[in-house]
Amino acid sequence: MENTILAVGLNPVMQKTILLKHLWENEVNRSERYYFTVAGKGANTARVLTELGADVLHLTHAGGNYEKMFRSMLAEDRINLYAVDSGSEIRLCYTLINEEKHTVTEIVEEAIPVKPGTDDHIRREFQVLLEKAQVITISGTKAAGYSDDLIPWMVRLASEAGKQVILDIKGKDLLESLPYHPYIIKPNMKEFSETLFPDQRFREHETEDDIRHAVENRMIELYKQRGVITVLTRGTQSVLYCDGASVGERQVVPVKPVNTIGSGDSFTAGLTYGVSRGMSLAESIDIAVSCGKKNAGLIKPGTILA
């Protein structure tokens, strides 16, 4: 299938978004507006790619009381879902939108470990789907119960098969995937700094020259040493990117957000879409920025359509 994208996410979510006129601690807060949707970085990325018109296969796991609803909702979103049985509940996460103060508060449940054998099932399914796709995007952390080498193994297989791999991951998974030459890595500033500079702690919106200089040098090193392109998001600040001997910058026009949850995943989807269509890196980043802004203006996370 030409231009098919395989979107992998191994930590699915059922997301409740609650709009509140105000949020008072230690008080009863009532809401007349709330929404229940499938989310998680993998599903959000797959949904936005589908909305962009891409041919997408979404690989994840599912189980427990919400599995039927999870599958049904993704079917309504026209997502081609390939979910292995995890024997574990899909986690719940909650977004509290305070309309009085224009704040978004996220409450995240940690995932229940997948049952033994899920890792093997995911590997077999990945190998089958890999043959059908040209671009592979892997997003987010993986649930407990998976082996440490799973994501680097996926990157190695995909790279050896000549696929373009785009990673929106961090930490050990990212570090151990770099030797297998992913095409693009897309962390945010905080994730990049904490992964590549483990002995330091940079704030996500830090602007000091020494931090910027260190980050840019590391981006250039990754390209020179491993051929890895870095696209670095920084919230409302400019996007940094490196696909050569210097670092480029794409300015971002701030918008008044409604719900920022899923905007990074929407950015990843736009970037992946551009790559899958053979666009330049700059063109792909423009699509990514547009997708992130559209998502931030909507209630439902991980979507660019009202």
Image (cartoon, grey):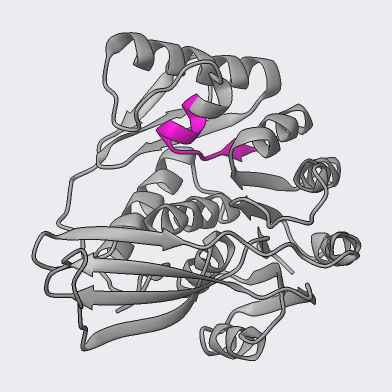
Residue 34 is situated, as x and y percent measured from the top left of the image, at 30, 83
| Residue pictured at 62% horizontal, 71% vertical | 55
Residue 83 visible somewhere in the drawing: yes
| Residue at 81 percent of width and 66 percent of height | 129
Residue 242 percent across, percent down from the top left: 48, 26
Q: Is residue 302 left or right of residue 79?
A: left
Q: Is residue 180 above or below residue 264?
A: above
Compared to residue 202, the image places residue 211 above or below, namely above
Compared with 167, 301 (above or below) is below
The magenta stretch is 183-193
Near-viewer residue (296 or 181) = 296
Left or right: residue 196 compared with residue 236: right
Q: Nearer the viewer, residue 98 or 130?
A: 98
**In which quadrant will I find the C terminus?**
bottom left
Q: Is residue 25 magenta?
A: no
- Seen from this angle, which residue lies furthest top? 210
